[in-house]
Image: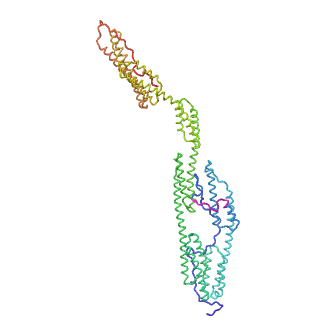
Amino acid sequence: MTETNELQPIPEVEAAEVEATQAPVAEAEPPTETPAVEENISVPEGSPVTIPEGSPEGSPEDSQPVHPLYETKEQVVDRLREIQAEDNGGDRSELDLLKQAFYKLHKAAQIAARNAFLEAGGQPEDWHAEVDGAEENFKAIMASIRQRRAQLAEEAEKLKAANLSRKLDIIERIKELATSPEEANAHFDEFKQLQAAWKETGAVPAERATEVWKNYQLYVEQFYDLLKLNSEAREYDFKKNLTAKERLIELAEKLVDEEDIIAAFNKLQALHAEYKEIGPVAKELREDVWNRFKAASTVINKRHQEHFEAIKAREDECLQQKTALCEQAESIQTDDITTFAAWEEKTKEVIELQAQWKEIGFAGHKQNNIIFDRFRSACDRFFSAKAEYFRNIKDEQNGNLEAKRKLAEEAEALKDSTEWSKTAKKLIELQKRWKEVGPVPRKYSEQLWKRFTEACDHFFEAKNAAGADQRAEETANMEAKRAIIEQLKELATDAANATIDKVKELQAQWNEIGHVPFRDKDKLYKEYRAVADELYKQFGASQARRRLEGFQKSVRQAVAKGESTLGRERERLMRIFEARKAEVQTYENNLNFLNATSKSGNSLVAEMNHKVEKLREELDLLSQKIKAVEAEMRAPKASPEAPATPAAPEAPSAPTTADEAAPADN
């Protein structure tokens, strides 16, 4: 072929032969334009601080530490000043990070201040955060940066508008060049310059980007269809475009191995933007090249979609878990909690719920703050009720403190007393009253209890020391009284030789002996009483017979002398009999009452039983006397000439019971 400096025309190609450069579904739009600077920079929700008891401030789910570069709020503010000085609006992600770091530190400081306020005795509803100078500086600098970003965004929009006008002019000029094959061939160099100018021109407003790019692509394809270039030039252009697109395809395929799917997705968008700027390839390769690029894009798009679906699923699960914790916290009832132990148990339950809350992840931007406010309200309600309970019992504990101080003072006033029995009773009564008084503030409890017990212990130790000699004397007295009981038992077994005087003598000795050990007192006296009663019973039976016989003789003598009226004597005896009978009835009624209400072993009941027994013996004697009178009344009268038998004088009566001779044991 003869070389020439003139471009040779090539066969015309139809518009359909020009590469269709449509992107896959996710990349159907033209390259994403630089987004406008946002006025408000989002603040990551939550903070890394721990929920304090009674008021779970902050977001307990955000347990990530503050950025390691920023340990104080002042460091964050200093970095903001540097960004402000650079006057380029800063990077949005860094601004987000700075705001997140600042407010985590800010919230941590607020919570620490609130906890200190509560520990000092303040109430949750009375706490108010103090003005933070660092926060004021932070807001002012951030506002300045936002203003600068807005200014830059406005300038960027103006530049995009200028770029749009420039690209529309380029499209219009290519459209003019593509009106006929002759013009296309003649203006090929200009066409190449227009393509270069297009690539050099920056982004346009996002709402016009797709429309402008499609129009540009349409007229570029029309121009290529009209070109009459030689085949070598055309093939060279196709090969150059193919090489460029294959490079982009290889880069897209390598993105499959990228661990950071977000970064991979953003890189893919940049590859698509570059892909769209490259011209067509040979017609027979166009579909294969595009399908290969589309296949690599589909993998990344799918991973990107699955990534956000997985995040959404985790957030939904976290929301469900947090909702369940809210329901548990809201179900805790405080009206029935009336003891410290019960409050402590419920407090542990709430703290455990808060610990579980911090283990649960983020619940999504829309719901996370809402669900946390709900959980915090439930926790605040519980701890407010707890604080109210302890406020209510504070006055009661102070009253108890004063009461126990008085008891301690009374015990201390008695600790040196030597009135052992009387003082011991008083101290025992003070100990009972101490137990009845409720709790006192913990910081006074141990000291006051020690003071009270030391006073009581001091007295009882002195009492025990003084009582050692007394117990030895009581033991000797017990042995002496046992010896008297043994002598009485010997008299009871030899009734013929026993005399009332000997019994009285032993009883007098018994009464002269002092106290015996308290635990043996009742048993010893019961044994003494039993043997004494047995002796007097023996004496009483024989005496009763002698008295009856004497009465019968005196009645007969009186009748013989004509000195007695049997009827009047019978009436007198009957009156005495009825009186004693009524007395027995009264005692029996009282005994029925006492047996139903008194404890066993009551000395009054035993005394009354003894009296009833003696009254019954007297009734029996009276009954026999009445019968003796009635027998004389029925007997025939003696002859007046019969001599009268003198009456024997009645022997003096012996005591009929041990009680008449011996007083109660001391």
Q: Residue furthest top?
A: 641
One can see residue 505 in this view: yes
- When asked about the image quadrant of residue 181, the answer is bottom right
Q: Quadrant of the N terminus?
A: bottom right
Residue 420: percent from left, percent from top:
53, 30
Residue at 56% x, 39% y is 450
- When asked about the image quadrant of residue 581, the answer is top left
Does residue 72 belong to the magenta stretch?
A: yes
Q: Nearer the viewer, residue 617 or 287?
A: 617
Looking at the picture, does residue 560 appear above or below residue 268? Answer: above
Residue at 52% x, 62% y is 317
Q: Residue furthest right?
A: 85
Q: Nearer the viewer, residue 70 or 206?
A: 70
Residue 377: percent from left, percent from top:
57, 54
Q: Nearer the viewer, residue 202 or 501?
A: 501
One can see residue 590 in this view: no
Q: Nearer the viewer, residue 374 or 358?
A: 358
What is the total number of numbered labels drawn onto the structure image?
0
Q: Which residues are magenta?
A: 61-75
- When asked about the image quadrant of residue 419, the answer is top right
Looking at the picture, does residue 306 appear above or below residue 187? Answer: above
Looking at the picture, does residue 32 appear above or below residue 186? Answer: above
Residue 223: percent from left, percent from top:
62, 84
Magenta span main SS:
loop
The answer to whether 644 appears left or right of 26 in the picture is left
Q: Residue furthest bottom?
A: 2
Task: Describe the colour scheme in one phrase.
Answer: rainbow
Residue 327: percent from left, percent from top:
52, 55
